Image (spheres, grey):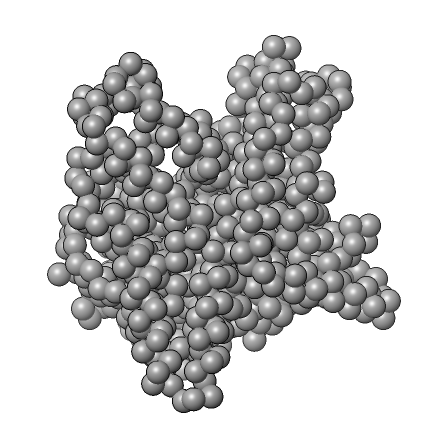
């Protein structure tokens, strides 16, 4: 038959009635509400008189329900490969059979047009069928993609306009836009992107739930058209496969505790680790952290015995696309730490803290459920909490604590040369963190926490005295990370007689060879070796075993010296720290002198404690990195020996082996089949992870977490960027956007802008006029160093590296947290 009611069409009848008609048939078969109508068989020829008469009779019957729409339904239209979007005809609001017949003729003639034939890749006219349906008197209409064709994520995309949807599909009106996600809590979470008063949340949830059900029934993602009539009934007007869709991002998640019960949704965040571990980890590093280091750290922080099954359930680090993330469910479950971390997060990273509060209130973030009887767990958790408190109480002598850290780090550095150790001893060296030699270095975790608590207590006491509050930590030079900048200054002063040598040689190896024979060169090299003996274990990504250190490649230090020789600073770091320290003491004394009598001794004591304890915010990390370098050297030596046995091609390939695989090789087991192929796959995977970072906050159910941007981002009115004020002061200068800590990429007095800055970047700070960073908060390592050096800094400025351009002049206000383009 040439004319069939829509409900009688076969879902496989595209070749007879065209794609649009069969799409409607699939909607009806899936149980969707579709306006009444019929379809006419596709043809490229003129209709016979008999068919025209039958068509007009069918239209007349349909007009009893109201005006109709006539639409093309070409063969191949709305298919998986071609949509023909906007190329064929749709004529709305027809009220007579004659008008409908004229509209059908226009649809058939459109199939003969040149643009349609070119799109179809055919010289012959396209066979076009006709769909006639009753019009929906729409209060709102639009489209729904059951999968985002742009590939942004796995959400549904809904666009809507008031009235009929032709204004949307023709591009005549900007639509309201929503995204919807199936939540792990049940139901849908609907997020508006552009509100225009067209839909409410309930409307969007109705569209989302029904669209998802239809797509599931049909079996593939759909591009759907819909409309709400005045009674609130949801009608479906078109269904076609989504064409040319990009795949949504997928994230490889490696949990440290596979059987943990995080509830319906796991929430991960990289707060406070995105600065120190911004890049993907090598496989050896992550598996070492997971299998060796994480049990040691969790025991140290929580006090839970290593023999307890509870310990594994408190592992709070997971890996997402190669990067470390906190498992927030696990973090909240930890004794003592769970309560402290929530409060510390609100202070250290207010943006992430506000986001976590919102997720907690919505029930999306819940404490990890611990296996076993809760009654039996209580005594063990109480004991662990008490032990953790006692460990924090041991940091009562900060100078002694600093000396202990340095003493133990030097002892690690002076352990026997790895080249003289057996392969079993090398493996033993890699377990150094779990041995008695590092017990006091591990206590640095508590030292950092105590330093943070003292700072926040002092900041609260001095809040009413802005100048003293802003200078509480400036000019404190005992921080080992600040000592690096002092050491670079000393190297630059010693290199002044060698200026010509530095100017004439551009590569580090060439410079080293020249200095060995130049007058005064050997003495300077000896000073460099002394510097590297103290700081050579540092460098960017220093927690990753696969990352090289300054001792292995001192190019960054050499370039800092070269920069200072070429453009000397008016003030040395030592003079700057002395000046800032004096200003801090004056500001504190001025604040104390104007405070009520009862507050004065407390304020003096807190200011003194801040000066004593703030170096402990950075020192444990600085000295702990000695251990990581020792483990790196042991791993590289094992890699060298496996090269000699033809197991590996280069010593560095050892970092693409997992820790348990390395253990097996040391114990004499044969290499796994295809080891080189596996290394190649892991190398490619690491490269992909570098290109495809996961969001800063991630939910296991795929619902995107929109972080509170009140403290970050750009004002739509004046272009001012806002972030977290971390170091007071105002500076104006040219922007230099940095992607790596390369001194050659900046000039003296630049305002440096970066996504992140681990401590390996901080030697650049004294050369800069101000620092702007996309991530980070008040107590991240870079913020501590910026405050101590009195460098204005604003962190947590979302999108700063893309919003600002090299050479653009800006004013940075570190007290207000603003970056203003001038």
Quarter of the picture holding the C terminus = bottom left
Residue 534 in the image: above or below residue 264: above
Q: Looking at the image, can residue 219 be seen? A: no
Q: Provide residue 564's location: percent of width, then percent of height.
A: 22, 38
Q: Provide residue 552's location: percent of width, then percent of height.
A: 44, 27
Q: Residue at x 43, y 53 (%)?
A: 478
In-front residue for pair 70/176: 176
Q: Quadrant of residue 236?
A: bottom left
Q: Provide residue 806's location: percent of width, then percent of height.
A: 19, 46
Residue 258 in the image: above or below residue 101: above
Q: Residue furthest left?
A: 822
In-front residue for pair 483/624: 483
Q: Residue at x 44, y 29 (%)?
A: 551
Q: Quadrant of residue 803?
A: bottom left
Count the numbered circles shown: 0
Q: Residue at x 74, y 67 (%)?
A: 386
Residue 717 in the image: above or below residue 108: below
Q: Looking at the image, can residue 494 be seen? A: yes
* Side of 688 relative to 716 (left or right): right
* Side of 234 relative to 520 (left or right): right
Q: Residue at x 31, y 31 (%)?
A: 558
Q: Provide residue 668's location: percent of width, then percent of height.
A: 75, 18
In-front residue for pair 505/713: 505
């Amino acid at each position: 038959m040439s004319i069939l009611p829509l409900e009688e069409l076969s879902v496989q009848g595209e070749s007879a009635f065209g794609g649009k008609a069969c799409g409607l048939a699939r909607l009806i078969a899936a149980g969707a509400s579709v306006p009444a109508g019929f379809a006419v068989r596709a043809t490229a020829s003129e209709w016979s008189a008999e068919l025209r008469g039958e068509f007009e009779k069918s239209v007349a019957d349909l007009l009893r329900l109201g005006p109709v729409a006539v639409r093309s339904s070409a063969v191949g239209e709305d298919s998986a490969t071609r949509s023909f979007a906007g190329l064929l005809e749709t004529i709305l609001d027809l009220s007579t059979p004659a008008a409908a017949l004229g509209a059908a003729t226009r649809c058939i003639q459109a199939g003969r047009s040149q643009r349609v034939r070119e799109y179809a890749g055919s010289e012959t006219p396209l066979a076009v069928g006709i769909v006639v349906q009753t019009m929906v008197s729409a209060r709102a209409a639009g489209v729904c993609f059951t999968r985002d064709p742009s590939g942004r994520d796995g959400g549904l995309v809904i666009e809507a306009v008031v009235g009929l949807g032709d204004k949307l599909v023709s591009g005549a009106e900007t639509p309201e836009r929503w995204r919807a996600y199936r939540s792990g809590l049940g139901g849908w979470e609907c997020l508006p992107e552009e509100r225009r008063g067209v839909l409410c949340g309930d409307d969007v949830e109705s569209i989302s739930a029904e669209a998802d059900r239809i797509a599931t029934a049909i079996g593939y993602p759909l591009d759907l058209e819909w409309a709400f009539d005045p009674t609130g009934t949801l009608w479906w007007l078109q269904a076609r496969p989504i064409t040319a869709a990009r795949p949504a991002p997928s994230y490889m998640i490696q949990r440290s505790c596979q059987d943990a019960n995080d509830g319906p949704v796991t929430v991960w965040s990289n707060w406070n680790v995105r600065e120190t571990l911004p890049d993907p980890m090598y496989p050896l590093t992550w598996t070492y952290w997971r299998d060796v280091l994480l049990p040691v750290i969790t025991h140290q922080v929580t006090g839970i015995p290593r023999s307890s099954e509870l310990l594994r359930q408190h592992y709070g680090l997971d890996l997402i696309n190669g990067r470390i993330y906190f498992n927030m469910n696990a973090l909240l479950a930890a004794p003592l730490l769970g309560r402290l971390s929530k409060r510390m997060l609100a202070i250290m990273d207010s943006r992430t803290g506000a986001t976590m509060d919102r997720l907690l209130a919505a029930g999306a973030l819940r404490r990890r459920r611990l296996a076993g009887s809760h009654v039996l767990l209580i005594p063990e958790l109480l004991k662990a909490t008490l032990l953790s408190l006692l460990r924090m109480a041991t940091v009562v002598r900060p100078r002694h604590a600093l000396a202990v850290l340095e003493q133990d780090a030097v002892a690690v550095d002076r352990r026997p040369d790895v080249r003289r150790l057996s392969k079993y001893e090398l493996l033993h060296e890699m377990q150094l963190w779990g041995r008695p030699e590092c017990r006091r270095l591990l206590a640095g975790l508590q030292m950092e926490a105590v330093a943070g608590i003292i700072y926040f207590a002092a900041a609260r006491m001095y809040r009413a005295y802005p100048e003293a509050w802003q200078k509480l930590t400036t000019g404190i030079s005992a921080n080992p990370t600040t000592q690096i900048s002092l050491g670079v200054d000393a190297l630059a002063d010693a290199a002044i007689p060698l200026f010509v040598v530095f100017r004439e040689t551009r590569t580090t190896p060439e410079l080293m060879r020249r200095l060995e024979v130049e007058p005064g060169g050997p003495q300077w090299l000896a000073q460099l070796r002394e510097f590297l003996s103290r700081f050579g274990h540092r460098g960017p990504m220093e927690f990753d075993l696969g990352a090289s250190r300054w001792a292995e490649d001192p190019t960054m230090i050499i370039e800092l010296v070269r920069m200072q020789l070429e453009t000397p600073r008016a003030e040395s770091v030592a003079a700057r720290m002395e000046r800032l320290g004096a200003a801090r003491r004056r500001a504190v004394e001025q604040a104390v002198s104007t405070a009520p009598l009862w507050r004065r001794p407390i304020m003096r004591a807190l200011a003194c404690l801040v000066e004593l304890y703030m170096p402990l915010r950075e020192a444990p990390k600085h000295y702990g990195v000695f251990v990581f370098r020792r483990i790196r050297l042991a791993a590289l030596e094992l890699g060298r020996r496996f090269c000699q046995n033809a197991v590996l091609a280069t010593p560095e390939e050892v970092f693409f082996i997992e820790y348990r695989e390395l253990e097996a090789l040391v114990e004499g087991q044969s290499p796994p089949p295809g080891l080189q192929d596996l290394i190649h796959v892991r190398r490619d995977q690491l490269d992909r992870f570098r290109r495809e970072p996961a969001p800063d906050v991630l939910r296991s159910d795929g619902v995107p977490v929109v972080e509170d941007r009140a403290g970050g981002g750009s004002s739509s009115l004046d272009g001012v960027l806002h972030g977290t004020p971390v170091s007071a002061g105002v500076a104006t200068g040219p922007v230099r956007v940095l992607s790596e800590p390369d001194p050659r990429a900046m000039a003296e007095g630049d305002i440096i802008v970066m996504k992140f800055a681990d401590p390996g970047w901080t030697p650049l700070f004294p050369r800069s006029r101000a620092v702007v960073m996309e991530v980070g908060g008040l107590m991240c390592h870079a913020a501590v160093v910026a405050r101590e050096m009195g460098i204005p800094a604003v962190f947590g400025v979302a999108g700063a590296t893309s919003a600002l351009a090299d050479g653009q002049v800006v004013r940075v206000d570190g007290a207000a947290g603003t970056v203003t383009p001038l």
